[in-house]
Image: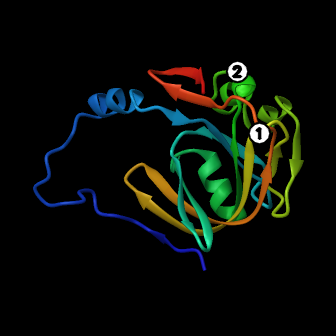
Amino acid sequence: MLKTHPTPDSLQAGAVAIDPVLFREGMSRVTAAVHVVTTDGPAGRAGFTATAVTPVTDDPASLLVCVNAAGRTAQALIANGVFCVNTLGNADIPVADAFAGRANLQGQDRFTVGQWEPLETGAPRLLSSLVAFDCRLSDARLVATHYVIIGRIVSIKLGDLKPALAYQNRLYHSV
């Protein structure tokens, strides 16, 4: 059963606050794979570009995704209870931009970029992705401004081997 857990404003009493601008600048220097996380179901079709994705365990296979709690996508993902993590190749920059809000597309219109098909859960898979992880939501925890989402993987679709899309210094790079 899905549970959401609010967390205290401070993770540790007496902790020194880090300047958010400095934190974002520091994180911009960390190279990360680029993903588009998608969902579909009773709450509607939605998605967002993410670099905050990591494996949790391989048995059972699960992933962790972080999403801004203020957006409609977070609410749709939690309500739908399913999502797909699509790992992007270098040729998928237009998809990354569309789901990051850089292409002036909103909601359902973002899915006009790229070719999509529903997976077992109903979550949309980008056909050109390097890999697509189809997940059922197993936990969502509110941590400050973001939900930390854990999904149990129900299927994996491998795409073609080709250069991956990475993000560093606020720019895309081919890896």
Residue situated in front as seen by the camera: 130 or 21? 130
Q: Residue at x 74, y 31 (%)?
A: 162
Mark with earlier residue (1, 2): 2
* Dot label at residue 103: 2
Image vertical order of residue 64 relative to residue 34, above or below? below
Identify residue type, mark 1: Ser
Furthest residue in direction front, as rendered? 161
Which quadrant of the figure has residue 12? Answer: bottom left
Identify residue type, mark 2: Ala
Q: Specify the quadrant that holds the C terminus.
A: top right
* x, y percent for residue 75: 62, 55
Give the class, few, some or many, for how many residues have Cα within 10 Å of label 2's Cα (few <14, many ≥20): some
Residue situated in front as seen by the camera: 82 or 6? 82
* x, y percent for residue 64: 54, 57
Secondary structure beneath disc 1? loop
Furthest residue in direction bottom, as rendered? 1
